[in-house]
Amino acid sequence: MPLLEIDDLSVCVSQDGTDTALVRSVSYVVEPGETLALVGESGSGKSVSSLAVMGLLAKALKVTSGSIRFDGQDLLALSAEEMRKIRGRDISMVFQEPMTSLNPVRSIGSQIMESIEENLGLSRADARARAISLLKEVGVADAERRLKQYPHHFSGGMRQRVMIAIALAADPKLIIADEPTTALDVTIQAQILDLMARICRDHGTAMILITHNLGIVARYADRVNVMYSGRIVETGTAREIYRAPRHPYTEGLLQSVPRLDQDRSVPLKPIRGNPADPFTPISGCRFHPRCPYVAARCRAEVPAFENGVACHFPLDPAQKEAV
Amino acid sequence: MSALLRIEDVSVHFPVRKGVLQRQVAEVRAVDSVTLSLEKGEAFGLVGESGCGKTTLARTVLRLVDPTSGAIWFDGQNISGLRGKALAPYRRRVAAIFQDPFSSLNPRMTSGQTLREVLKVNGYPGDIPARVAELLTICGLAPRFAELYPHEMSGGQRQRVGIARALALDPELIVCDEAVSALDVSIQAQIINLLEELRVKFGLTYLFIGHDLSVVRHLCDRIAVMYLGRIMETGTSAELFDTPRHPYTRALIDAVPAPDPVGEEAREHVALKGEIPSPLDPPSGCVFHTRCPIAMDRCRAEVPGLTRLGGHHAAACFALETTAGTPAKKE
């Protein structure tokens, strides 16, 4: 049984009495222990859809359709109090900016221990022991002394390690990591992602990894959902998607990034135009104004999501390999 | 070829003051004895992680920060001592493009007003409205964008306006400080291609500062890798990326995941241990020794100079002195 099952999820924002869809009928599952990447550019809905899972949508945002089942429970049917218990204990989240997600006026120790006491009901002394072992596990040296320190005593990479320790406090089944290393230097990014991968493997924790970095996806994800303008446009294993993208947007993304493993004289092939603005109505496929293969049908009909791709004329991998 | 810009043994140290008397208690060596030269028409990249001094060096070239010692030569003139009016001709020949066009453009001015102001203040002799339209067109924007405010444009469009502003006075050197870092992947590719096209079209020289190795390698002919204020390795893109000789350069390249799941699985990678030390209290000897996998006793005590490795290639590492002259093994 999948750990998380999202079916036909739509999220709207209400502004001046009109509703605008930010997430459009998104469905996917996360199996226990796997790492699923959500990839997309700004406005693709990758963050909003995962905030919906956490029950952390901003007030102006509403789930307008669909269901979110976690471990057999319908999360959308839970009360705020019941949802609060699931957060932290069964599902936890790691955000991009660890400076703004830690409380600056409380010691690191009290913040980790709060999460442990709250979710596991341990005594103060046991919670402290667990906090120390968690900090050691995430690679914070001299853990006993560092428990008493405050977030500003920690570097960016160390703060992110603390956030991971807090996320792990109750041994959750699912971690949602939203651009966890985007604010970090590249050598520190590698450390943090290697750490998260090791933890997920050791604990059998599933992870939803939200990122815009296609290299990170290739190195760390088992499966990938590519999102564009609120929809999943393509899904598959990382190998399938990179070897033979079937949605023109996926192909465009892969051709847009300069790569160290390719000749630098190969020119980049950017996708024309700008990412779709959710507030601008677009007929048919929302990618059609930027698509190099656009046809009349794309302007008129919204493509259904079939066989892992939402496109009227998916690219044929066999054909591509023949060329 | 002649050097357009020559940075000669430049150091930038910032005092750290404390207490009511603002006594100087320490010093941050943001840039330490850096020497570089940029040929006319080339794109030169500076890469490194936070605190490596790449942005301070760029700001020194722009004369927004004064060098503590050393000289900056531009087209045969030492500009590091110039002040006030004497700097004006230099400022017209050098422009900058910054990371976040939203904060570098005035939110209360339309693109047209921003561009007109630059031209007017600098006494542009030609037809100003025609030049504004021309600049926008060069940067891939329709002339109607002159009427738009920054908030009415997307990130990519704002960066195009930022580039148009940099081009306004026909500069020879453009300092690009993380010019594509804040952009979405598909837009980043558009701006990279635009920058390349403009360099060829107008014979521009770029000093390109970035943290994304793939972007810098793609755009730049030559690159210098900085760490804690010092140059660790420098060379052509091919020299640096095909045969990196400094352990820090190797670690940096290794840390970048390639968008290729099969290759990533096959590649063995070793994450660099430890944190970047504080520039307030840099390690003794070679600044990299605290994280270096091959550090020796000598590295803790002495500062390595750049060892020439043939071509444009040079690296600051004692391990090279014993093997200098022999071709580096590719790992």
Image (cartoon, rainbow, N blue to C red):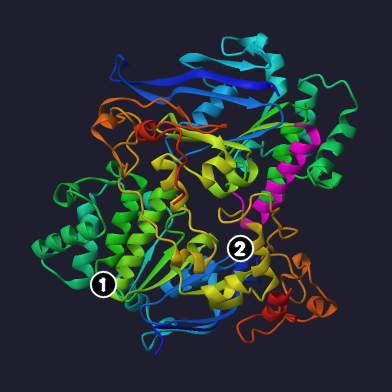
Residue closest to the far left: A125
Q: Is residue B58 left or right of residue B157?
A: left
Q: Residues within 10 Å of mark 1 (few under 14, many from 20)?
A: many
Residue numbers of the magenta segment: B182-203
Q: Secondary structure at mark 2?
A: loop
User: Is residue A59 visible in this depiction of the protein?
Assistant: no
Q: Is residue A115 above or below residue A206?
A: above
The answer to whether tags 1 and 2 share a subunit is yes
Q: Is residue A123 left or right of residue B182?
A: left
Q: Which of pointers 1 and 2 lies earlier in the amino acid sequence?
A: 2
Judge by depth and name the residue closer to the eye, A175 or A120: A175
What residue is pinned by disc 1? A171
Residue B188: say if magenta.
yes
Q: Amino acid at mark 2?
A: Gly
Q: Residue at x 20, y 54 (%)?
A: A109
Q: How many marks on residues? A: 2
Q: Residue at x 33, y 34 (%)?
A: B278
Residue B253: give x, y in percent of width and height: 47, 49
What residue is pinned by disc 2? A43
